[in-house]
Image (cartoon, rainbow, N blue to C red):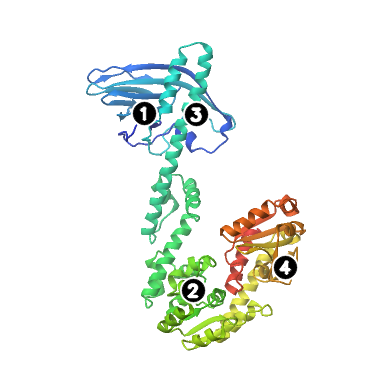
Amino acid sequence: MVRGAINMGMSDISGSGQAASSVIEALAHTVGDWRGLSTHLEEMEKAVLPAEQEATAAGRLADGRVLYIIVPDRGQVHFVINEEQTPLRLASAVVCEPGDMVAWHMPGGGAATVWRFRFALTWEGGPDADNGQEGSGRSRMFLPAADFRIRSLYHAIEQGWRQHALEQFRCQSLFAELLYILIRQQHEASREDSQAAIAATKRYMERRYMDKLTIEQLAHRTDMSQGYFLQQFKKIYGTSPIEYITECRIAAARDILRQSPAMPLGDVAKSVGYDDEGYFSRRFRQKLGISPVAYKKNSELKVIALNYHTIGHLLALQIIPSGAILDPRYVWDYYEQYNADVDLHLHSMPDEETVIRELARHRPDLIVLRDNTNPIYVAQLRQAASVLLLPWNADVQWRELFVLSASFLNKEAQAERWLGQYERKVDAVKRKLPAAVRRDTLLVVSASDYGLFIVGDRHAGSVLYQDLDLTPACPTAEAMQPTTPETLGTIPADRVLIISDSGPAAERQLAELANCPTWQQSGAVRNRKVHRVQRGLWFEYTPHAHLWSLDAAARLFR
């Protein structure tokens, strides 16, 4: 069996594509402490293969680990290892393991020069590098990458090996460099091939999400182990393969529910890959925050969320607005989740006049917005639909706003059930918080495009301080209190949560904070108890956002 082959030419080498394993592949795919790796070149020889018609070399048993470099001078060389034949037209490197039977023949008057390097390999604290293994199941890799450094290295080794002991000593470092280049090329090609295989498998999942796919099947398509496939898929796409299949199924179900609302829910479930209607409904609700039944009914009620702070009240009542402000810069989570379900994207409209005109065409049943909106604009909106104005001041808590919204929509019972479920979840999360987190004082900081702020007991503070009873390190009556890096460094906080925007201005704020000497000496920094998270829904003052923040806190502080 060919244990590894690396092409050093400019185009593909024809080969059988069978499984291969070599020290080069093994090292290229292994994560370990490379400092413990060492090589020792034991023997070097060069041979010119005969140019006779159908010339065949007698078999030779590899008496150790051997690197062959074969350079066809004319025609084609058939290099044979353990009865497996590989035609070579371009310069190639092949690693053989101890005991491999090596031979070659050259049909049609071919000729080649072969360099043979027998070497030992040790790896302290790592895998047994001298234990050759049978084929690993990976396809043989041929790299179309001619490298002048490789040619110069094996020629230098050939010349130095014939000279005195000092030059032979230098050959050891040259050979190590030669192996390094081969390993690195193999590693880079393997990484590119792995990403391409995973991308192809992802496309396969998008086409076949309704089938009963398993990790074993998907990993087999990439020619990877299940564990490595799971690791790499999550690294590239930020989610597991099973969760991605669920996303594909839920997205397909949404399309069906929108286009065929009369289809029975059980049929919808089966068409996207779920035999159990109840399980389908639970997964749908986990992903979207509303049930499939409520999703179907959304087409019957057109509600407009004219401020993004009002979206979360509607979602908790199982209503996806048909028109909304979904600016991805500020509400990426809403945009990513519900963009396809919103007909009117109000954030893309240039002015209020355009909004009024589009609302008249849309003919909504209800418009929800904050009461700090221009009265003239509100009067114009009332001509298009009923208007619900939600009070927006520090004296009104989110629960009151939620109940007010529910009352207007005749959903008081639904709001009461939701609040009961929320309180039970708060109790469950509090019980699971580690004792160290409950003891620590907490400072919540916002790093936004507008500066640094200490977060009070509204927004994120409402969940962390009021619901979870964590102790604020710097109590403030303000929802958002402007601050500086120096001030933050003087606050005696055991733990710090930094919630940051993703814009360049926010990154500059964080850089200034990181470089502030006072901040660097603060207890939370020295004890490595500083957490940084993206904005998400932390600053939404709505029931849906509070539930999101509660889940985020549970993951963050577990």
Residue at mark 4 to residue at mark 2: CA–CA distance: 31 Å
Which residue is under mark 2? Answer: 291
> Which residue is pictured at 49% across the width and 23% down the height?
174
Point out the tag, 1 or 3, that comes first from the N-terminus: 1
Determine which of the numbered discs, if any, sits on residue 131 in the image. 3
Point out the tag, 2 or 1, that comes first from the N-terminus: 1
Q: Amino acid at mark 4?
A: Asp
Quarter placement of the N terminus: top left
Which residue is under mark 4? Answer: 469
Is label 2 in contact with label 1 (beta carbons under 8 Å)?
no
Q: Amino acid at mark 3?
A: Asn
Which residue is under mark 1? Answer: 92
Q: Which quarter of the picture shows residue 389?
A: bottom right
* Neighbours of disc 3 within 10 Å: few (<14), some (14-19), many (20+): few
When the figure is inspected, residue 221 is found, relative to residue 8, above or below; the finding is below
> Which residue is pictured at 43% across the width and 22% down the height?
154
Point out the tag, 4 or 3, that comes first from the N-terminus: 3
